[in-house]
Image: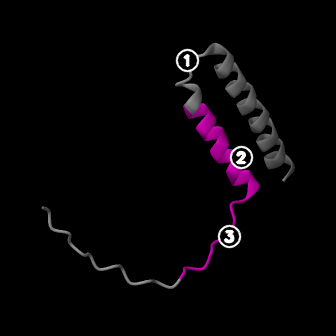
Amino acid sequence: MGQVLQFRLPQMRPEAPAGPALDLMSAVDFALRDLADIGNHITLEAVREQAAACRQMLEAAYLAECELG
């Protein structure tokens, strides 16, 4: 029979204050980067085309917002 070891539970730390929520422009920027990475690994042509269309749509919206401020 094995021996059961009791580990000490870590002490509770006070919660860190929540930082600012992720803004929309940063979220779109991250999504664009992810779609670019994912697009390189997609094997189905239809899915690759859909990902590219999604990326183009997000990129156009992102660039328009950056230009208009």
Percent across and percent down for residue 67 are 82, 46
Kindly check if marks 1 and 2 are in contact, taking CB atoms under 8 A apart as contact: no
Q: Secondary structure at mark 3?
A: loop
Q: Position of residue 60 (x, y in %)?
A: 80, 36
Q: Which residue is mark 3?
A: 20
Give the extent of the magenta segment: 15-37
Which residue in the rendered view is the most extreme toward the right?
A: 68
Instruction: Categorize mark 3 by other alpha carbons within 10 Å: few (<14), some (14-19), many (20+).
Output: few
The type of residue carrying mark 2 is Val
Residue 32 within the segment the image draws in magenta: yes
Give the number of the mark in front: 1 or 3: 1
- Mark 1 or mark 2: name the one nearer the start of the chain: 2
**Mark 2 sits on what residue?**
28
Give the distance between the C-alpha atoms of the residues marked 1 and 2, in whole angstroms: 24 Å
Distance in Å between CA atoms under marks 3 and 2: 16 Å
Residue underneath mark 1: 43
* Magenta span dominant secondary structure: helix
Q: Nearer the viewer, residue 4 or 14?
A: 4
Q: Quadrant of residue 23?
A: bottom right
Q: Which residue is rendered at x = 44% and y = 83% of the image?
A: 12
| Residue depicted at x 66% and y 39% | 32
Q: Earlier in the sequence, mark 1 or mark 3?
A: 3
What residue sits 64% from the left and 21% below the top? 48
